[in-house]
Amino acid sequence: MDVLFVFLLFSTFLVVMFSGYPIAFVLGGVAVGFASLGTMLDYFSVDADMASLRMIGFVANRIFDTLSSYSLIPMSMFVFMGMMLDKSGVAERLLTRMHSLLRVVPGGMAVSVVLIGVVLAASTGIIGASVMLLATIAMPAMRGAGYDDRLGLGVVGATGCLGILIPPSIMLIVMGDQLQIPVGDLFRGAMIPGLLLAVAYVVYAVIYAILHPDRAPARALETGRGAGEILRDLLGSLVAPLLLVIAVLGSIVFGIATPTEASGVGAAGATLIAVASRRLSWADFREVCEGTGLTTAFLFALIFGASCFSVVLRGYGGDELIEGALHAIPLPPTGTLILILFIVFLLGFFLDWMEIILIVAPLVLPVLTALGHDPAWVAILMAICLQASFLTPPVGMALFYLKNAVPDVEITQIYRSVLPFVAMQIGILVLTMVFPKLALW
């Protein structure tokens, strides 16, 4: 009966999910439906702390637990910080001035996009905002400079996804909360793999430009302006965002502040930057607050539904069933890890990162930890793996953001453009597996 109910639970979830109904309500609705069914059949048993609660109490309890989670507060603060920086115009100024300096370098504009993407990733952590912003300001400039769309689309799409790995990352905050791993550990662990990805993108852009100079032409420095003057302008534009990144990430890395405290500093700092740049009106401030509320509500709704789903799955003994199945696989500990990462990578083709973290990760992490793997290392490997899901069809969200920002290109052309970058992401994943210290330094 355990196997039957767990199989029916997952099957119903998948069928209803592919109907196009909002995923948060699919998770919660299927969970409540199966809990009600099991209760009527006198087969379902909820956790001990919920044994006396009726069904509506069980749902309300999960919602209250999620809303009162201290570790999830940074999520709303970092969303606010990213949207406020978007209003400040930091990215546009940086891209213009950085390209003025790097235009003599092969693939200089693509390199500029990657470097700006790293600054945005360390400042926002919001994939949609980063991809749309980079595509809006970089694609017209790259086309005007004679760059091939294949390089431009790939660089913009992949670089925009760096925010999901480079701290402060919304995904790492949710992962830390769900897997009971300190968010600060995940932030520190993701830094080197994230920066290695950025370095790989830069190297690829330079090599591509050297091999195909007609598709990524270099340009002479602007007439009448020396490199020193352009460099001073660039450094002036970098001061504010770099100080913000140092204040947020530096305080976490050196143990001065918790991620929750640092997120408040980041939100306040981004607001000050927008005010100082004279780009913040009352209408903009209201728009940022409303956007933050909507985004946070969407993320919390997913967490509510997944929380109910995980409780019902445990009530049917699903976690023990999956743990037993994984232990029964005749593979060494490393082989089991590779198998699970491969499954996570495949799931990324069809599921969003949130569903995978909320449903799959809590089920497999205890098994991998019992096999002797460090939980923070496994979480970082999963994060790298999930980052690739943003660029893999058919559900790669970055692909659709890119298509929306550049409507005159075919979606198949975007698919082909991002393939080399997916390969680089897999390469960094393998490198982090072979050298765990990259994440555990």
Image (tube, rainbow, N blue to C red):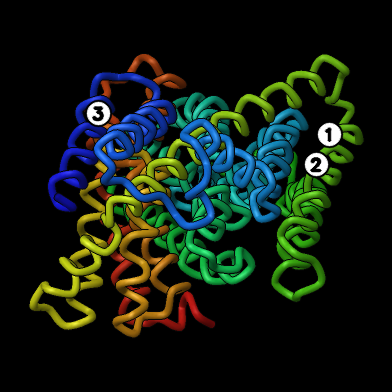
Q: Residue at x 74, y 56 (%)?
A: 260
Would you say the residues marked 2 and 3 are in contact, meaning their CB atoms lie under 8 Å apart? no
Type of the residue with mark 1: Ala
> Residue 118 — which label?
none
Type of the residue with mark 2: Ala
For label 1, the residue is: 274
Would you say the residues marked 1 and 3 are in contact, meaning their CB atoms lie under 8 Å apart? no
Within 10 angstroms of label 3, few (less than 14), some, or many (20 or more) residues? some
Using the rendered view, name the quadrant where residue 407 is placed: top left
Q: Secondary structure at mark 1?
A: helix
Q: Quadrant of the C terminus?
A: bottom right
Type of the residue with mark 3: Gln
**Residue 158 position (above or below residue 89):** below
Q: Secondary structure at mark 3?
A: helix
> Residue 270 — which label?
2
Q: Residue at x 34, y 85 (%)?
A: 372
Q: Residue at x 44, y 66 (%)?
A: 380
